Image (cartoon, grey):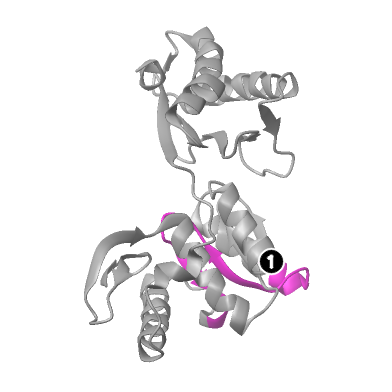
């Protein structure tokens, strides 16, 4: 296993296959939803029923894995590590939940047992400790522990930027496009508006996966994230309808990435 981490984030590369002679092959990344899922496996044993606070972009499959498979609670909040940490502290302090972990898909992670410090080194040590225990017990790859995590084959992210570089323009376009997207969801059986979403507009696809638009925290950018069972489904059920919406702002918004 190879690791890379700075003071605030952690990411890993793990072997998918481990032979009886100890040989390792078919390395895959452990990051994003996968990293959160593996931490969920650990805390489902050490703190059953605890809460994971994540950013808004985590997948539908992760939510199902944490709640249905592991019996944990998943509180999907806002993008930004300071936001997820603050929410975890608030939930725990109020007694509303035992929020053991606050984590973003970027790898930012803070744990209650470590004083909610945004500490990638601490996260890395937790994973390495799990690796050592798995190796000592003769178990296979750590990826086997999250084999029930549903992952969509097609994942894309687009960034649509206001042509004048203005946050005000971005906000105005985002607010109007958000209402159009909500109307689109209400008129279609292929897309269901996520009422519980706390940032931007998020919709579930009937065929599996989701898509969401949100405004960047700091830049004049509208971000679109799509997870679906295929590129064709993403094109027909998400990109083409959204292209119709965003084309209304031609000249004010650069949506060329969707056209491509």
Report the magenta residues as a range.
Answer: 90-113
Residue at point 53%, 49% (across, down): 79
Quadrant of the rendered image containing residue 62: bottom right
Q: Is residue 52 above or below residue 163?
A: below
Q: Nearer the viewer, residue 178 or 183?
A: 183
Tell me if residue 1 can be seen: yes
Where residue 162 appears, as percent x and y from the top left, is: 42, 21
Where residue 250 appears, as percent x and y from the top left, is: 45, 8
Q: Nearer the viewer, residue 59 or 122?
A: 59
Residue at point 70%, 32% (across, down): 192
Residue at point 74%, 39% (across, down): 195
Tell me if residue 219 can be seen: no
Q: Nearer the viewer, residue 177 or 150?
A: 150
Q: Is 93 within the magenta?
A: yes
Quadrant of the rendered image containing residue 68: bottom right
Q: Label 1, secondary structure: give it.
A: helix
Query: How many numbered markers are drawn?
Result: 1
Where residue 51 appears, as percent x and y from the top left, is: 66, 68
Which residue is situated farthest in the front direction here? 20
What residue did someone put label 1 on?
90
């Amino acid at each position: 296993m190879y690791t890379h981490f700075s003071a605030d984030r952690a990411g890993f590369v793990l072997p998918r296959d481990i032979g009886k002679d100890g040989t390792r092959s078919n390395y895959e990344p452990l990051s994003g939803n996968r990293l959160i899922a593996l931490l969920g496996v650990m805390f489902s044993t050490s703190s059953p029923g605890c809460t994971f606070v994540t950013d808004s972009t985590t997948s539908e499959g992760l939510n199902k894995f944490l709640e249905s498979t592991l019996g944990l609670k998943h509180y999907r909040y806002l993008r930004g590590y300071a936001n997820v940490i603050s929410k975890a502290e608030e939930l725990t302090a109020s007694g509303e939940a035992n929020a053991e972990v606050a984590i973003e898909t970027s790898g930012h992670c803070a744990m209650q047992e470590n004083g909610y410090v945004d500490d990638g080194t601490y996260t890395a040590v937790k994973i390495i400790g799990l690796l050592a225990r798995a190796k000592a017990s003769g178990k296979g790859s750590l990826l086997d522990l999250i084999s029930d995590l549903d992952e969509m084959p097609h994942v894309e992210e687009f960034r649509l930027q206001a042509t004048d570089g203005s946050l005000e323009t971005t906000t105005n376009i985002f607010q109007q496009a958000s209402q159009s997207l909500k109307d689109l969801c209400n008129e279609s059986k292929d897309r269901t508006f996520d009422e519980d979403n706390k940032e931007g507009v998020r919709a579930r696809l009937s065929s599996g996966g989701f898509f969401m638009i949100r405004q960047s925290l700091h830049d004049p950018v509208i971000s679109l994230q799509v997870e679906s069972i295929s590129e064709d489904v993403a094109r027909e059920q998400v990109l083409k309808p959204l292209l119709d919406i965003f084309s209304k702002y031609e000249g004010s918004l650069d949506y060329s990435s969707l056209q491509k």
